[in-house]
Amino acid sequence: MERQELKIDKIDAFELRDIFDCGQCFRWNEEPNGSYTGVVKNGVLNVNCDSKNIYFKGNLNCDIRVFVNKYFDMKRDYEQIKSKLSKIDEYMDNSIKYGKGIRILNQDLWETIISYIISANNNIPRIKGIIERLSKKYGTKVEFENKDYYLFPTPVQLKDVTTSEYRALGLGFRDVRLFETTQLVNDNKVNIENFYHMKTTDIRDKLIELPGVGPKVADCILLFSDLKRFEIFPIDVWVRRVMNDLYIKNSDEKKVNNKAINEIASEKFGEFAGLAQQYLFYWRRTLN
């Protein structure tokens, strides 16, 4: 690990709270000075902004500029996408104005799979706590700013962990799912590296074969990992509510099925449905 720093010009589509508090990630936390520190596959990174610049500093095992460009999706023109989406209707326009600084992160695929298995029927503070305990017990320690952090454990580091040990970390019924998925990967019965070369529908089918991965979790993995399938539209209670309120208008939102929501999302938002979902989700959940 090497301590590195990077300063780049500020851009509109980069606001710390929008990125890290929109529900896509679990290992970024706000510091007293308003910056955010995150534990990522390649180390520990702190990000801060002012009106002119974005500042990155951290201990990483790779070049910081290369990492930032990939992880924060810096090569994608979010302003062009926002301009296109905002013309769809006033709802999208309003949600984009509210969450104008959102970027979809390219998170490590393995970590995203396990994190979203943990997320099932769970809340964000508890998810973050479980992931932190799992990482501290089995992950690699990295020191940054005189504080110890722990990388998310690799499949090999979790190879001999038992279901009872997972349960002791607070996983509850997810202990078996985490154990079985880890064994499938370690035994090469599932090669997640192959996912990068597959069609979206085929990846989704393979993900759903993993214990603890249902349709919603699979969609979150497809969108929020470095698979980065922007056409995917994950549906949770908040997304169902906002889509029903704005577009479907069923008096009983529980009767609104995912197929109807996905059809509207595909028709309205097309190849950028995933980003549209994040704007709508963040807008509705935060202002509710």
Image (cartoon, grey):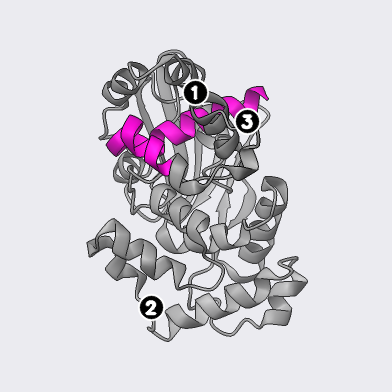
Residue 285 disc label: 3
Do we see residue 2 in this rendering?
A: no
In the depicted structure, whether residue 131 falls above or below residue 273: below
Q: Main secondary structure of the magenta part?
A: helix
Residue at (51% x, 77% y) in the render: 182
Which of the two residues, 251 or 148, is positioned nearer the viewer here? 251
Do we see residue 270 in this rendering?
A: yes
Residue 179: x, y in percent?
A: 59, 78
**Which residues are drawn in magenta?**
262-288
Residue kind at label 3, given as amino acid type: Arg
The residue where tag 1 is placed is: 99
Q: Is residue 265 magenta?
A: yes
Tell me the quarter of the image containing the C terminus: top right
Is disc 3 placed on a helix, strand or loop?
helix
* Other residues around mark 1 within 10 Å, as few (<14) / some (14–19) / many (≥20): many
* Other residues around mark 2 within 10 Å, as few (<14) / some (14–19) / many (≥20): some
In the depicted structure, whether residue 247 falls above or below residue 121: above
Q: Is residue 241 magenta?
A: no
Between discs 3 and 2, the one toward the N terminus: 2
Residues at marks 3 and 2 touching, judged by CB atoms closer than 8 Å: no
The residue where tag 2 is placed is: 190
Between discs 2 and 1, the one toward the N terminus: 1
Residue at (52% x, 47% y) in the render: 257
In the depicted structure, whether residue 69 falls above or below residue 92: below
Residue kind at label 2, given as amino acid type: Val
Residue 158: x, y in percent?
A: 56, 77
